[in-house]
Amino acid sequence: MIEEFKKYVDNYDLNNENIKLKYNHSLRVMALSRKYAVKLGFSKDEVELAVLIGLLHDIGRFEQIKIYNSFDDLKTIDHADFSVQQLFEMGLIRNFWKKEEDYELIKFAIQNHNKLKIPNINNEKFVKFAKLIRDVDKIDILYLLCYKEIITTDDPISDEIRNDIFKHKQASRKYAKNDNDKLAIHLSFAFDINYDICLKEFKQNFVAYCNLIKNKKVFQEVINEIENYIDERMVIC
């Protein structure tokens, strides 16, 4: 599986920092998927399926950066939908997984890993895998953000984003009007961690990320709200 993935990524410019970033992110999310699938009691076959989803969840990113030179989904293409297109319309999935009976589940989990909400469907198994990839992806996104320069200004956080945070909802990217809004959206990921067992590692990355924010005045109220939410939930679980 990993060798096939490496072979695929070799088709792209490995000197491109964005290609390297997504390659390494994919490997880390794969490892997190295995770690938490085991902790959650997934069967052996389910663990391997979760590992595959973790590895391939962002596979459309490579072609996205090649075509658009951007990871901005709102200005280019939804990368999860594009990943599904590459895997299933272009037939790439056959290089990684032969069991066609799992294709709809794989497609559902990958297509919905970046959406604001998981669609309301009556299929517990599909939802189980979708929840896992969403959780581990967010854990690693915050980890990654701790290694990027954090740009903040004195701009207030938009009302729509603040309202979502104080309603304990993941804020929507469509409301982002400035860099502070984008940062606040990352913080709001806390409200979409589905499995309690994933919350501890998410909190570690959340705290590290918050410690890098220079202009705390703009963010302190929302940080306090989110930290209280996380702490209260961790006590309960």
Image (tube, rainbow, N blue to C red):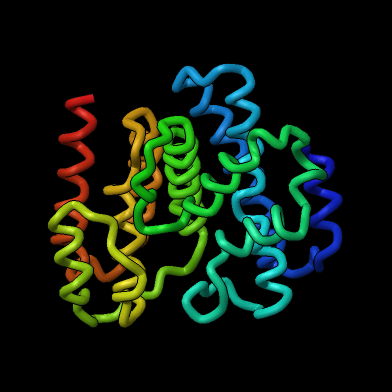
Residue 16 falls in which quadrant of the image?
A: bottom right
Residue 182 falls in which quadrant of the image?
A: bottom left
In this rendering, the answer to whether 163 lies above or below 178 is above
In this rendering, the answer to whether 177 lies above or below 111 is below
In this rendering, the answer to whether 99 lies above or below 174 is above
Residue 129: x and y in percent read 49, 36
Q: Is residue 65 at all visible to an observer of this figure? A: yes
Please state which of residues 43 and 152 is positioned toward the viewer in this rendering.
43
Which quadrant is the N terminus positioned in? top right
Q: Residue at x 28, y 63 (%)?
A: 171
Q: Residue at x 21, y 76 (%)?
A: 158
Residue 92: x and y in percent read 77, 52
Which quadrant is the C terminus positioned in? top left
Residue 199: x and y in percent read 34, 36
Residue 186: x and y in percent read 36, 60
Q: Is residue 207 at all visible to an observer of this figure? A: no
Q: Which residue is drawn at 66% across and 61% down?
A: 85
Q: Which residue is drawn at 23% across and 55% down?
A: 169
Q: In this view, does 48 lie to the left or right of 81?
A: right
